[in-house]
Image (cartoon, rainbow, N blue to C red):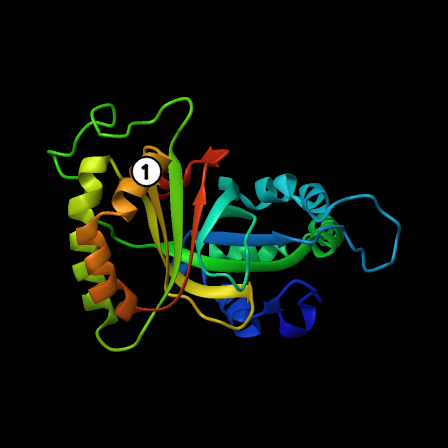
Amino acid sequence: MEPDALPTISYGTIDEQYAAHLGSFAPEDDQPLWMVNLMRYRGKAEYADGRATDLTGRQADDAYFPYRQFRTVGAELVFVADVEEQLVGDDQLWERIAVVRYPSRQAFHDMQDLPDYVQLHEHKDAGMASTFVIGCLPMPWPDLPDDAPTLDSVPFPSTPEDGPVVIMHVLKFNDGGAIEDMNVYQDAAGRVALPQGVRIGAWLEVEGTIVGDGRGWDQVRFNVFPSRAAFMAVAMDPDRLAAQADNREPAIADTYTVMMRPMLDRLGESISD
C-alpha cells in the first residue's frame, strides 16, 4: 500500500512506514501476522456523509466486521472479548479486544485494497472513537511444568458463576535493564500464579502499530486465569506485590491491562497450528 492510497480515518493515526513495511516482503520471506485490535466506541455512530442513524458506535462496528474479506485473504478471527474491567491505564478506556491472524503480512496489506472491504470501512469509521491495531509475531514463553496442578484441583477453579478470565497486558519497556527486571518479576509471579492454575494464552512480540496514537509497544501478553477469584489471589499475593514494586514497575514505561471473558478464544491454537 503506497502512502497516497492510505485511507483517511477519524479514529487514529496510520503509521505509513509500517504500512509500507507490510507490503515489502517476497512470499518466501513473509510469515503469519497477528493483529491485536483495541477498540473504544462512539456513543452514537457518526458517518462522514452526515447521514441520520440510530446506530450506536458498537452497532456500526458490528456492521463493518469483514468476515467475508477475511476469508478472501485467508485470515481468521481468533480472539474476541468485551472488556470486563480495565485494571491499568486510564487515558483510553477500551471496550472490546479482537485478534485476527493473517497468513502473511502481504495478506493484511492486500485486504486493504479489496473493493468490498473499502466499502465496509465507512461503518468502522462511524463507530470507532479510538482504535489501536498492533501487528504482532509469536514470541517464546515458559513451558508449563510437568508438576503443574490440574485446573480442577486449584484453590479457585472455574465455576458457572465465576468462569475463566483472560488478562491482557500491552507493554512498553524502559530502556536499559528492563527485560532483566521483567524476567525477575516473571519468575516471582510464576511461583504464585502456577498453584492458582494460571496458564499463558499467548505472548506476542510487537512488530509495529499500523493504527494508533503515535506510541510504540513492545509486547502483548494474554494470561488465562481459572476464575476472577484466582486472579485476585495472585494479584494480592504479598510476594508478587513486592516483585511488582521492585522489578515490574521499573521495567515498564507504559502499559494497559484489561480483564476479559472471551466470546471466542483460539489464539493459542492459531499459533500452534
Image coordinates for residue 204, horizontal then vertical, percent: 36, 54
Q: Tag 1, which secondary structure?
A: strand
Is residue 239 at all visible to an observer of this figure? yes
Is residue 270 at all visible to an observer of this figure? no
* 254 or 220: nearer the viewer: 254
Q: Is residue 224 above or below residue 150?
A: below
Query: Of all residues shown, which one is farthest toward the left?
Result: 147
Where is the N terminus found, in terms of image quarters?
bottom right
Residue 88, quarter of picture: bottom left
* 273 or 235: nearer the viewer: 235
- Label 1 amino acid? Phe
Crowding at mark 1 (Cα within 10 Å: few <14, some 14-19, many 20+): many
Please report the residue visible at 41 percent of the width from the left and 64 percent of the height from the top: 207
Please report the residue visible at 16 percent of the width from the left and 61 percent of the height from the top: 184
Image coordinates for residue 32, horizontal then vertical, percent: 42, 51
Image coordinates for residue 84, horizontal then vertical, percent: 49, 42
Query: Of all residues shown, which one is farthest toward the bottom?
Result: 176
